[in-house]
Amino acid sequence: MPTDGPRRRAGPGWKQLTPGARAACGVIVLFVLAAVFAPLLTRYQPWQQLDVVRLKSLPPSLAHPFGTDRFSRDVYTRVLYGARVSLAIGALAVLLSSSVGTLYGAVAGYAGGVVDTVMMRIIDTFLSVPRVLLLIAVLALWSPVPLAGLILLIGLTGWFDIARIVRAQAMALRDREFVVAARSLGARPSAIVWRHVLPNVLAPVIVAGMLAVGNVIVLEAGLSFLGIGVREPTASWGTMFQDAANQFVSSWWAVIFPGVAIVATVLALNTLGDALRDLLDPRQLPAHPGSEFQEPAHG
Amino acid sequence: MAEPLLAIENLRTYFHTAGGVARAVDGLSLTVAPGETVGVVGESGCGKSVTALSILRLIGAPGRIESGSRILFQGRDLLSLDGRAMRAVRGNRIAMIFQEPMTALNPVFTVGDQVAEVARIHAGASRAEAWKRAVEMLDRVGIPAAGERAREYPHQLSGGMRQRVMIAMALMMQPDLLIADEPTTALDVTIQAQILELLAELQRQFGMSVLLITHDFGVIAETASRVVVMYGGEAVEQAPVRELFAHPHHPYTQGLLAAMPRLGASRERLQTIPGTVPAPTDWPAGCRFRDRCAFAWERCEREHPALHQLSADHASRCHLAVEPERRVAHPPAAPAEIA
Amino acid sequence: MRTLRLAACCLPIVWLAACGRGEPSASSAAGAVDGGTMVIAAPGDADNLLPPLSVTILGREVTDLVFDHLAEIDDSLHTIGDAGFTPRLARSWTWAPDSMSVVFHLDPRARWHDGQPVTARDVRFSLALYKNPKLGSPFAPALANVDSVSVKDSLTAIAWFHARQPESFFDIAYQLWVMPEHVYAAVPPEKLATSELARRPVGSGRFRFVSWQPGSRLEIQADTANYRGRARLDRVIWAISPDNDASFAQVMSGQADLLENATPDQLKAAAGHAGIRPFPWPSLQYAFMGMNFRSAKQRTRPNRFFADLRVRRAISMALDRRAMLHNVFDSLGAIGYGPFPRVLSTADTTLRIPPYDVAHAQALLDSAGWRTGPDSIRRKDGRPFEIRLIAPTSSAFRMSYAVLIQDALRKVGVKVDIDAAPFPVFFAKQTAGDFDAVLAGYSTDPNAAGAVQSWGTKSIIPAGGNYLSYSDPTFDALVDSATASFNAAAAKAYATRAYQTVADDAPAVWLYDVLSVGLINTRFHEAPLRADGWWEHLADWTIPPAARIDRDRIGLGAPKP
Amino acid sequence: MGRRVAARLGQAIVVLWVVATLAFFLIHAAPGDPFGFDAPSITPATRAFWRHQFGYDRPLGVQYARWLDNVAHGRFGYSQSLHEPVRDAIAQALPRTLLLMGVALVAAFAIGILLALFQVQHRGTRRARWAGTIALLFYSLPDFWLAMVLLLAFAYWVPILPAGFTVDPVMHQYMAPIPALVDRLRHLVLPALTLTLLTTAGVARFQRNELLEVLPLDFIRTARAKGLDERAVVRRHALRNALLPTITLAGLALPALLGGAVFVEKVFSWQGMGWLTVNAIGMRDYPLVMAAVIVATCMVVLGNLLADLAYAAADPRLRAD
């Protein structure tokens, strides 16, 4: 039942998850394992062209479970390594945006008053610029952008929602007893934010971050689809899809498998994020209605 | 006593949550005779509001009224009615008014609409007819310029006015039973008195029974004829109001009465009984009040007390009824956690 | 500088050996009634509609159809003397005895689309405009040998040449589109490119311009009052969409009639589809991976990698051209034989080219001082062998080659960064020499001088189209001899030796010859297709009445606003 | 109300100023000269002429001031790739995007709200869970992926709908008004459907959450106590309240909708703002790209403003003051 202690309850247990959420966990773990152990799971390299004449565009077989693409690269290998790139972009970009957003939101929420108003106005301003268009404009101006730059750009355009969530939490926490107590004992604001506010906003940030990872994966795929994302020969699911999209009729396997990987991962992340959100506190999120529409792609 | 209008028998309403089963109401029985006003009193969390909602079967998941419970209204067990029959009772034969008139009214409809809606549901009245009756009823509950006020939204009215709207809504169909759940708690003292007066007046006019739920003995004293004291999801003492005030038996009742500052002016929660109501997920074995009881002894830990009949119309759920010599004060065994 | 012309056709390119389909002559369609609408799914917009300035494929198509030459080259593209040339604006012509000038007698029936008669003054104006440096026409160098045009009377113009050359007539007839003075003189040449006139051409061709909505739609219609007879089709509309897949879908669904370039996958998907057939067309384009002789960033310095002949030869030997060809084109590809397309009359398919030999390539790189480092990338003086290869994203084929080359060169310790960019950006980088290697598609003039424009010392950028800054005096001399020869056999012999010189210097890896295959709706009867532009005889294309669909029956007339 | 509008307008202007400034410095920080690549057809003299004409040879501060002035007056310069003023290009593209987005927005909100009602009325049942899963699936689909699948399905495998925008609108000038209208609608179906499907899922999720937040409230209990059935409780009492934040959502959904439109327009060659932007990127047409970003931001700001005003008008608690 409701506790008044400073910490949330330890978090939902495995048993409280719906079967769908458990399956989603499984899918995510599977892809993470695939990404981490990719070299052990295949004997090829993702960029390796096996035989550009005899082994190109082969349908799935025992030797090549997902077939080969038009450059005779093993699609299975590329999906594995693509998981590395896509998940890494998702994870790193969201780590960046979560860090920035959490800090920003915690400061704004804890400070309150004019500082808070100004900081929130800044967020409102950025939220008015469609993220996809902003990214397209910047990426187009500076293309080709290296992978690190891509992650940086995606991360730095995605922290606004998390900042809002954290701010709302921080505002609520500001007047709670243990924070008041800490303040009256003379703790510095930075220490209070660090010791009391941040640990308490962690759970909703993790949930929001999980949903954001899915969005970033879709976003990366979309940018790669427009030809301004990840570049050859690096394989991401987005580039793989883009590369093979116009051969859907002749070699569907080169399109389907990366496509399924994207959809499965994003669906799993969203399912799990939703489930955790419901468990943690059904009324807590989203912090503002627009986060239902986190871009890209969405819709 | 005549055939009761309402007879609750062994009502058990449990909430099946992830944290365990919360036995919010656990074996409550009470009756309301026609024209009678019964007060149900207790601290928050004692199960009195859940009782009120259980009567109208407005308990939502994860709450459930357990089998074996019976709520006889005019001889019919409400728990056996189908949805349609039950809806025909709600707002029609049994009406209810709530504690917070600011939140209990829908903010996006005019008050006239909301009152008229009752007539449209239960009397099949046309829009114009329902509106006319709504304005009449608003007038009757003492809303000045009711015709204009009916076109206003809840936020445009004062708290007292809103509660009058709630009352108008409840009385539209001249119900047989009115359940009033803390009808005055959220109001100013002067308004409280007005509302109670209005309720009493209307009860006389309509000849209905009232089940008045409150934590405030002051309110009980003014309006009720009989009192049920609830604690831990069960009735711990029942008596006519004068008898109870004169001879409270249960230590809990005594505590409540002692904490009552003066008639009709108690707005803050009763805090003078040490400790808080234990969580309904784990009522202690034995007597549920024992941790806060000045007289508790080892029997109270061991044995759940039965409702002992002290006289024909006075009962108490306390071992003191059989071992009155134990009424010797000592400090509670373990001071309960204070938030 | 004709190179520019089809280099702009950055589009997918396929080769077929046979040019021209079954040659339906104009007479075979004699019974057909004029009319019909052709919708071409165009992959890119026009840059402008000024004959001296337009270098995009759509711009060339429209200007070629709306404007006229003085005389027209024949379908086999003979360039020496006036052999094979047929009358256009000039009804006839007379050579001066010293061959230093030609008198053109203009057709008195010729009218501009605004109704004004075509006069000798227009011819003089047009030449002057082409050669005006303020206009900056990329085609001006091709008219270098034409000194001027003088007006004898309104229907008689005399073209004067600097020197007696085999291709003097070709220069004035083929390279110059005649434009109306009373229209184009209204704007100073330096502002012409951005003026309204650049978007609303007035010519004398059998099609006249109707409308252009940039980015989406361009329309021409038959000029019914034309002195050479109206175009057989009522109208041609280019529906512009840069999305090849969408264009393909539109042709498949019958919304569009012609897709100029289809990928092998699309050809496969369209095979057996009723109402659509392949549309192969010849071109003068060939594609190769060129290696820059100069530093990408500092034009004055030699390229760190490719200034060394051993490295260039090693790169050539490391690439399996035939495997790559097969990968990209399946069985439809045509291997490159050297710095020319095989349809050229001077082409020689027996040149000695460095063979595919990875071991030899490795040895050459070792001997050039490029040693394999710990990361399996070669290094010299501590700097890695890491090159930047530019390619246009608009060409699916060249993009494929980029990926294939990247992996092939990785195997010999060369790291390739693909710098893929949209065509305008690619083109700017190519023009500026800002690359180590380039996937280039050159289109050459039908004459031998075309090679000078791509490989001659005097054409090194920014003066001309020699983007690699290749320079070899032997080649320059041989190709000069070839162009100065009035004897076709001798010209070919010189040209062959010139080509072999280039091949031995290995400035490029000759990847493939371009012959595009598109898709076309079966209701069209084509006129002969010319290698320098399939559309040149579009005015003689017809649609049999029985095959017509709704949009063929609209008839002439201005569209609603 | 007046003060509210004024305050929001003030905010909107600040937002646009920030974005215009950002665009200005982005263009100037970008590598390369916006005129550098058009080399073959533009001579150095011409380039110098136009550089001067556009003021690119002036000090940065002067250029910035001129830029702001121009943007404020809707002058975004000259598009190098389209050979027409950027304003003309946008004037053509914007109505198409507004049409597409308008249809998608209305359809998505209608379907999304109905879906949410279904899920809430039947909450806890298998049907509702399936509806939720399907909504989540659509929510998880990449835009371009769904667009391509629909394109393949309806324009290629079962060719009953036109693939793109380009061709038949090309012929519109020669069509009678009614067939032209029908044709336009046919071309609208696939892109609008894609955008609708992508947006619906978000609306449904949001609306469902809002309804579930309203349902535990006291006045819902009051409505039940009156004897209303669950359907009426949800549709009349809960929905009316839960719809209020959804009005705001319509504004907040705009950035995502615009982002989605980029991909949908690209795949279906729908020649609106998104299509224009993607092509402008291809041509390195910086003025056009920046104008697109600014115009899109304008749309978002304006949309939010309208949504705010609509909210104020719809909520009786705000209407009074």
Image (cartoon, coloured by chain):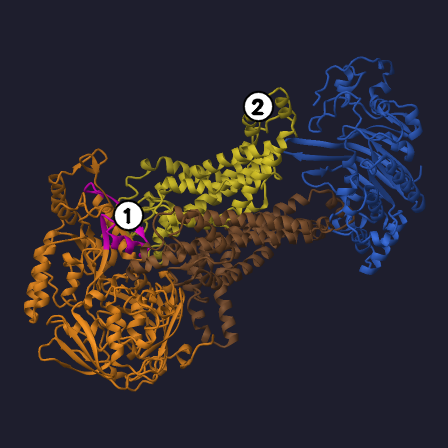
Q: In this figure, what is the number of numbered marks?
A: 2
Eyeballing the image, is C55 above or below B339? below
**Residue C510: x percent and y percent?**
17, 56
Secondary structure beneath label 2? loop
Q: For residue B200, which quarter of the picture?
A: top right
Please name the color used to draw chain C.
orange
Chain under disc 2: A
**Residue A204: x percent and y percent?**
55, 35
Residue denoted by label 1 = C418
Q: Which chain is blue?
A: B
Residue denoted by label 2 = A188
Q: Nearer the viewer, residue C487 or D197?
A: C487
Query: What stretch of residues is rendered in magenta?
Result: C410-439
Magenta stretch: includes residue C417: yes
How far apart are the two marked residues, 2 and 1, measured between alpha carbons? 53 Å
Magenta stretch: includes residue C411: yes
The reply to whether residue C177 is in sight is: no
Eyeballing the image, is C398 above or below C273? above
Q: Amino acid at mark 2?
A: Arg
Eyeballing the image, is C484 above or below C545? above
Is residue B6 rendered to the left or right of residue D2? right
Q: Amino acid at mark 1?
A: Ile
Crowding around mark 1 (Cα neighbors within 10 Å: few <14, some 14 to 19, many 20+) is many
**Residue C547: x percent and y percent?**
36, 79
Q: Which chain is brown?
A: D
Please name the color used to draw chain A.
yellow
